[in-house]
Image (cartoon, grey):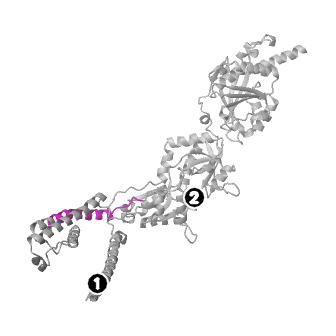
Amino acid sequence: MKNFAVLKLFIGIFSKVEFVSSIQSLLKNLDNPVRITAMICWNYSTRIKFTSRFLKSKYFNEERSHQFAITESRIENFPQVIEEHQQLIIVDLDCKNTQKLLQDVGYKITRRFKWIALSEFYESDHKNLKEILNKLPILTNSEFYCVLKTLSNKEETSLGANNRTEKEFEFSIFQVIAVYKPALDKSLIFENLGIFANNILFVQRKVKELSIRRRNLQQTKLRASLVVTNNDTFKHLEDYRNRHIDTISKVCYFLTNYLSDFVNGTLEYKFVNSWGYKDENTSKWSGMIGDLTENRSDIGASALFYTPDRIKYIDYIAMPTPTRSKFVFRSPKLSFTENVYLLPFDRFVWYSLFGLMAVTSIVLLSVTWIERKIIISDNQIENDSFVLRPSLLDVFIVVFGASCQQGSAVAPMTFSARLVMMLTFITLMFLYTSYSANIVALLQSPSNRIKTLEDLLNSRLKLAADDTVFNHYYFRHATEETRKAIYEKKILNHDGTENFLPIADGIEKIRNGLFAFHFETGVGYKLLEELFLEDEKCGLQEIQYLQVVDPWYSIQKNSSYRKLFKIGMMRINEHGLQQRENFALYTRKPKCVSRGGNFITASLVDTKPTLLVLLWGYLIAFIILLIERILHKIHSKIQNYLQ
């Protein structure tokens, strides 16, 4: 009886030890995890022998540092690590506690841990495995491998147990399979990865990448949540009509259908009216994100903005469309932002012009003074009202009139003085012609002064935004100083109403000018292209308001389909399907093909600087008149007093 117990112990020890070589070969195909934990129910001798042989294997003689631990198969001993992808767990399916351990682990099986399950009992239909594993959440992203002993050299050569040596166990044959389920309600699928015999793993799988091998979900039901903000969308989800309504959802609807075909799934759509925003009171999410976080949907079928507060609740996997929301407006005329009467000349040209007038006045004053003192008698000048007198004010008026091409009612008497005046008129004529030509061009030119949100805030343009859910949310919750000021001063009215308009009304206001409208550009440009004349499409400007990147496609956090869906979306993009749908449903910014084709009439805004000069001139002249009147009265009183 004692000899039988020793024999049983000897066979039990070596029956577990012979798994070491097969595990070692499998590990090399699992990207060499660096932490290995065996959670088993073996006796002390079996553990020592297994650990000793495992640590002597070639796997632990490589340059990478590895960690190996062996412990009881209880949930409290489960390793708590951050780098889950580097952790491998070995369990023995022949242990009674293993099934309970796997049930207690739960969804950690679908995380990034790698698993190797050992069993000495092989059945061709895997009936024993189904009984143990069928209720476990071993899903498509699970790396759960089973090493099953199918044949030993004892069965092959009929050698007695007493004649068996450790070396002989190397010739045992093991089958290596991977186990997963497409969904919790589906049956287990067994992938035959290879056969281990004679210290060699004969790999039978054709594709190494896990997600590619398991892309066939066998018509698994995929729940998709789609955002619809207009009932018209239900009529035109697939016929490309009314492209400007819920465009991003229509694009993602087609892409989601392509994704379902890629994985061989069956879609079940749920329609919501919002992408989802967090309720600060309940900490719950509404709309599409609420469906994802509360396990009512697997896929967020409408792309949404990538924001920091959403990262820990959902997973972003792809960028399906490059559309963005911006303020769009027609560039106002240059006279709305600049004084066009100062722009024709550079400031140095203005300095030169004033210098020329000053020098000309001095020269002309000098010549006329010489005329009066030396050449011509005073009596002749006094009797002729058309002769230019050597007065600084008279000379300045003549030169100023020459700069405005107004001519002069007086002229000097000598040829030298007349030559100075002639040259002055010719020189200032060219400057006047250049100035007039530039003024005409500038009055027809658009302004590019409004380039930032701060410029937009300080401009005379009126602002509004498209009446959508996300515009309401982001404008009302803006915290950045300039963006908050835009909402409070330009969007929010004094009576408490807000400038959120239907997109068609907003586009029409843009056409009328001096109006900036915030909308999704790929959507709004479709209406803009239909409503605007060709010359009105020129001078369109865009300014980004939302501090977000392009919309992303989302799924449940830590979904077992994450990598599979990500690969599917990349394939859809690579094959051109994503680009096709974007081109079919989105409209790009209209091109300007007839700039300057329409003449723009001058308005009061264009002539405002000249009117201001005239009014200020009248005011100054009137003030000087009053001063002269007062001085004249004072002078008269003094004269009367002296007499």
| Residue 614 drawn at (x, y percent) | 32, 74
Q: Earlier in the sequence, mark 2 or mark 1?
A: 2
| Residue 470 sits above or below residue 395 on the image | above
Query: Disc 2 versus disc 1: distance between alpha carbons?
Result: 69 Å
Is residue 432 inside the magenta stretch? yes
The numbered mark at residue 478 is 2
Name which quarter of the figure residue 389 lies in. bottom left
Provide the major secondary structure of the magenta segment: helix
Please name the residue that numbered disc 1 is placed on: 635
Q: Residue 337 falls in which quadrant of the image?
A: bottom left
> On the rendered structure, is 87 left or right of 234?
right
Q: Residues within 10 Å of mark 1 (few under 14, many from 20)?
A: few
Label 2 sits on a secondary structure element that is loop
- Provide residue 534's location: percent of width, then percent of height: 37, 61
The answer to if 435 sits in the magenta stretch is yes
Specify whether 378 is left or right of 212.
left
Viewer-nearest of labels 2 and 1?
Answer: 1
Range of magenta residues: 421-449
Q: Nearer the viewer, residue 429 or 57?
A: 429
